[in-house]
């Protein structure tokens, strides 16, 4: 039986990102993926939000994505919300189809030497105190210290673990296809009494069509005849639709795993939470799940941190996904076409055009306002560290360039040696720096400049100092384990 420290079920964006995080930490990780290659049928998710681009920037690979995508200065919740004034290097949504995002992530993971078992699926497992024995679809088995289910909304890992997937059943369904037309279609979006419909042109000249169905339907494998019938009912013609590469149905079913962990089995991405695609948050939530989990899992495997560190994965990420679920349910409700909902939408549009509500909602959609509950004190605590242009003895450095190796980071802005993490020097990078400028956070605005910050590998601030070491040792021990002896 082949063994790995971690086996990841599913090689989509979440699984790939998690594999990269673990490989950076020196962990033996393998992916089990049912596809024979990274090729993805259909375009799927349409882009990357600002915080996802930041975490990719933290690993030094954001430019790979940006060079292939298109920048859009707005996020969407009911109306377009401008984020071009947000204090981040990535104050935009990057239009980039999922098939390209996956290809780029897969290239990075290959560079890091991650093993991928293709044309295999996880069919079941047994776990005990020290091991997970994983059954594959071809009858072979793998052994791992931990198994992570990144295998989508119908996750076999979640089901085998017996983890409840609580939430709300579907109320609305949509048909989605990518195909050719014999006739020029009516490009763009239109509303009718059932909801929104749209036809958009893809980069290869084909069309992407979304149709709101008049009645809720189940089953995710509709055929071309069913699609033609629905399209004709909306547009009066099917425009000679032909040669589809992908036809699917999705709904507004909204569910979340009650637990993200059962002993040595964890969930991330769609395996942990599903919701309708409004706002384009699903892929981004999964990537950010992976970045939160990866360094914690690596430290536990290395014996640096106790197993209890993994409990913080759920306590931090579960509320973030729950908020996205509420957000998308509200978004679906606002698409209804009855007069009362339209009136509500008009009022909401007025509020969202005001600066405060715009920033509040745009911060949520972009995930730039994510705040982990790490205690009271400075507004930075628990929030993402800004990517400041630092002045150091080695020259100018960006904060995110110091996170490329996914190691914790202590930055001192006061007198050299004013705070010290020497006992943790084998795992915490320490930098003396100056920053000449205001500290500004998305949504909150300007905040008081700290004298020192401790930054976790996921880019969130674990401790803020005002010139002394109060609380630093406690934070170092909590997040990065007991220091090495001798």
Image (cartoon, helix red, strand yellow):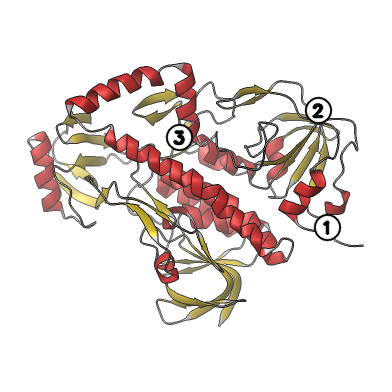
Q: CA distance from mark 3 to mark 1?
A: 38 Å
Say if residue 375 shows up in the picture: yes
The percent position of residue 103, horizontal first and vertical second, equals 47, 52
The percent position of residue 34, horizontal first and vertical second, equals 40, 66
Q: Residues within 10 Å of mark 2 (few under 14, many from 20)?
A: some
Where 483 sits versus 332, above or below? below
The percent position of residue 118, horizontal first and vertical second, equals 45, 68
> According to the image, label 2 marks what residue?
434
- Location of residue 156 by image quarter: bottom left
The kind of secondary structure element at disc 2 is loop
**Residue 45 in the figure: left or right of residue 371:** left
**Residue 228 in the figure: left or right of residue 420:** left
> According to the image, label 3 marks what residue?
365
Q: CA distance from mark 1 to mark 2?
A: 28 Å
Q: CA distance from mark 2 to mark 3?
A: 32 Å
Where 450 sits versus 170, above or below? above
Mark 2 or mark 3: name the one nearer the start of the chain: 3
Mark 3 or mark 1: name the one nearer the start of the chain: 3
Say if residue 120 shows up in the picture: no
| Tag 1 and tag 2, C-beta contact below 8 Å | no
Mark 1 or mark 2: name the one nearer the start of the chain: 2
Mark 2 or 3: in front is 3
The kind of secondary structure element at disc 1 is loop
> According to the image, label 1 marks what residue?
483
**Residue 388 in the figure: left or right of residue 411:** left
């Amino acid at each position: 039986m082949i063994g790995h420290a971690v086996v990841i079920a599913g090689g989509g964006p979440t699984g790939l990102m998690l594999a990269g995080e673990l490989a950076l930490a020196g962990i033996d990780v393998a992916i089990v993926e049912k596809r024979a290659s990274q090729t993805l049928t259909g375009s799927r998710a349409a882009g990357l939000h600002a915080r996802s681009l930041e975490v990719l920037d933290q690993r030094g690979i954001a430019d790979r994505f940006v060079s292939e995508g298109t920048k859009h200065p707005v996020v969407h919740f009911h109306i377009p919300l401008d984020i071009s004034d947000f204090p981040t290097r990535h104050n935009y949504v990057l239009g980039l189809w999922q098939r390209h995002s996956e290809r780029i992530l897969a290239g990075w993971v290959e560079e890091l030497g991650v093993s991928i078992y293709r044309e295999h699926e996880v069919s079941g497992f047994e776990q005990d105190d020290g091991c997970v024995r994983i059954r594959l679809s071809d009858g072979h088995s793998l052994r791992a210290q931990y198994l992570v289910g990144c295998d989508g909304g119908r996750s076999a890992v979640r089901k085998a673990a017996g983890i409840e997937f609580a939430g709300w059943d579907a109320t609305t369904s949509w048909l989605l296809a990518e195909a050719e037309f014999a006739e020029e279609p009516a490009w763009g979006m239109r509303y009718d009494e059932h909801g929104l419909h749209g036809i958009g042109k893809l980069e290869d000249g084909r069309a992407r069509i979304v149709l709101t169905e008049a009645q809720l339907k189940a089953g995710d494998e509709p055929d071309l005849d069913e699609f033609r019938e629905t399209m004709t009912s909306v547009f009066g013609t099917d425009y000679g639709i032909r040669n589809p590469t992908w036809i699917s149905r999705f709904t507004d079913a909204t569910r979340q795993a009650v637990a993200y962990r059962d002993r040595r089995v964890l969930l991330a991405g769609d395996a942990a939470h599903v919701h309708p695609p409004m706002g384009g948050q699903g892929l981004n939530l999964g990537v950010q799940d992976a970045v939160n989990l990866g360094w914690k899992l690596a430290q536990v495997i290395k014996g640096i941190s106790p197993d209890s560190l993994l409990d913080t994965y759920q306590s931090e990420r579960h509320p973030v996904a729950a908020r996205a679920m509420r957000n998308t349910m509200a978004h679906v409700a606002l698409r209804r076409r009855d007069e009362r909902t339209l009136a509500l939408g008009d009022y909401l549009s007025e509020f969202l055009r005001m600066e405060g509500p715009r920033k509040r909602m745009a911060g949520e959609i972009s995930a730039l306002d994510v705040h982990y509950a790490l205690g009271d004190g400075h507004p930075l605590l628990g929030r993402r560290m800004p990517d400041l242009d630092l002045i150091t003895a080695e020259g100018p450095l960006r904060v995110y360039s110091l996170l490329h190796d996914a190691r914790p980071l202590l930055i001192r802005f006061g007198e050299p040696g004013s705070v010290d993490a020497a006992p943790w020097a084998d795992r915490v990078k320490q930098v003396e720096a100056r920053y000449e400028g205001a500290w500004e956070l998305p949504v909150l605005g300007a905040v008081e400049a700290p004298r020192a910050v401790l930054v976790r590998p996921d880019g969130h601030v674990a401790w803020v100092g005002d010139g002394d070491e109060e609380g630093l040792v406690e934070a170092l021990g909590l997040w990065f384990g007991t220091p090495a002896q001798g």
